[in-house]
Amino acid sequence: MANPIKITDTTFRDAHQSLMATRLRMADMEPIAADMDSLGLHSAEVWGGATFDVATRYLAENPWERLRTFKRLMPKTPLMMLLRGQNLVGYRNYANDVVDAFIKHSAETGIDIFRVFDALNDERNVEQVVKATKASGKHLQMAICYSVTEGRMGGPIYNLDYFVEKARSFQDMGADSICLKDMGGVMAPYDAYELVTALKPILDVPIQLHTHYTSGMASMTALKAIEAGIDIVDACLAPLALRTSQPAVEPIVVTLWRTENDTGLDLQKLLSMGDRLEAILLNYKKEMESPRAAVIDAKVLSHQIPGGMASNLISQLREADALDRLDEVLLEIPRTRKELGYPPLVTPMSQMVGSQSVSNVLFGRYEMVSEQVRDYANGLYGKAIRELDPQVVELAFKADPEGHNPISGRAADSIEPEMDAAREAIKDISSDEEDVLTYAMYPTTGLRFLRIKHGLEPVPDEMKPKDADGAKPARAPQGSAVQPVGRGTGEAPPKSANVRQFNVYVGDEFFRVEVDAAQPESAIGAASPAVGGAPGGGDEPSISTDESPIVAPLPGIVLRYEVEVGVQVQAGDPVVVLEAMKMENTLPSPVAGTVRALSLEPGATVAKDDILAIIAP
């Protein structure tokens, strides 16, 4: 009996998130999106995950505009997004009103399928998302984060019964389909067969497989899952397949051709699209670089790093000039994961374990602990799979032992509504619901993006598209926050802070232009100088021999200062909060003294060893 396998294509989301830290720009996806729409896919994953964060933080692109563009170019294909439960597309739990507004607007803008997961498989953390998705009338796919502790399915934690019970629970909550989300590529082929075989009789909804090629098993795992009766499989175009990404769709199509599971997809179309994507990726040589010659990493069966985390880890270590310590970090990850209660390594738990492992290697074990790890230890991310190592908890809270006050209820219940505060925070910039949601997701990096989007700040050079060698801007993609404007006959004057953007429609075309008053009334929104120190972007302040600087231990973003210039501090008092590897790290004063200078403004991007503050005796 014919049972054609349906395919979800991940080229436009998880494939490039896994291989190139989500840096593929919208302008480079547009040329193949229409052809993708003609394939007859089950769905295309185009949004969510890290795409929202990266678009605003690194690419100066509007993620909402990206979604609208995909909907316009792919009207026949259901569009899917990956949603991190109560974390949405961020790295913390958001208030229920933010969850409701985000899902409602995402559904109205173009999302048809919400793939929802919680990093701890904690049903309480997806309750509000389930309600909001059902209210939107869209498809709710609930994902089970797959993990192992012993190399294969089994043992006291991640055994067959565990996954079967989670699937039952998610179906009872209202799932329209169930996804087996193998983010680390650690699902062995025969374990996939056993698991799908066990799930088919007890589930009334379709089952989908999402896996990664990291360990080299993904194609075998997909085939065994198909033999067991799985309904849908994730795959992507060959240029962005394998390695830490998904299986390539082309060999799956050929393998199943003329069988009862024939996908019905046109191989020649896929090959043609792959050729065009291959040419596009020439502009991303740097992002596609890997420090390893091997296409697979069999060590993933030990460290279990998911694809997106792996590319980000390499990128962060390279920026910290510590790529030579990658092997040490990979050895540290399973140890840190065990100490933190064996969480599945998926966002945000993968970032917590990964960044903590980096800190343990670079600065000493648990000498620097992120706020997120402390929150996790206090139950603010949900119920841990296993109890955390008591000695590690003690180390994490050694500077504030009273800060260890774990909760037992649903973490988001203690969060006050946030949307009104977000509207108030950006009322002088925008009242648009999309902008409010962007700020609500990322108050620091999101605010910087909004200032760029609305012409209050120029696009930084590091956010502009680069040529194939990463040397200079090569193009300005449609959908980016700021588009180039026509040149006048004379030398253009510098832009003021009052620049505003407008869409100009000419027939079927539109152009994004910037408009600036010839004599701006004021410099509203202009960047203010750094607090008590050198202006942002200027030279670092000078330091006398008896003063103590606080420097950035890793590249990152200054989120906020906890003190003001002139206040007295004691050794160990918190001074500045630095976001590094997407985790918040509070940097203390190394000595007792007076805060003489705070060198940067919140939102500033810093390199390793940049001076953040100066403490005078």
Image (spheres, rainbow, N blue to C red):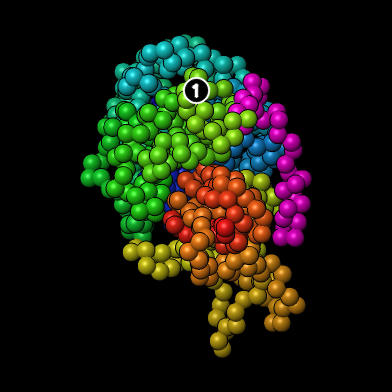
The residue at 49%/22% (across/down) is 390
The residue at 50%/61% (across/down) is 546
Q: Residue 597's quadrant in the figure?
A: bottom right
Q: Residue 403's quadrant in the figure?
A: top right
Q: Position of residue 555 (x, y in %)?
A: 45, 53
Q: Position of residue 268 (x, y in %)?
A: 32, 45
Front position in the image: 484 or 521: 521
Q: Is residue 551 visible?
A: yes
The residue at 44%/57% (across/down) is 609
Packing grade of label 1 (10 A; few <14, some 14-19, many >=20) is few
Label 1: which residue? Answer: 390
Locate the N terminus by quadrant. top left
Q: Residue furthest bottom?
A: 490
**Chain part drawn in magenta:** 403-430
Q: Amino acid at mark 1?
A: Pro
Front position in the image: 204 or 93: 93
Vertical side of 241 occupied by 166: above or below:
above
496 horizontally vs 586: left or right: right
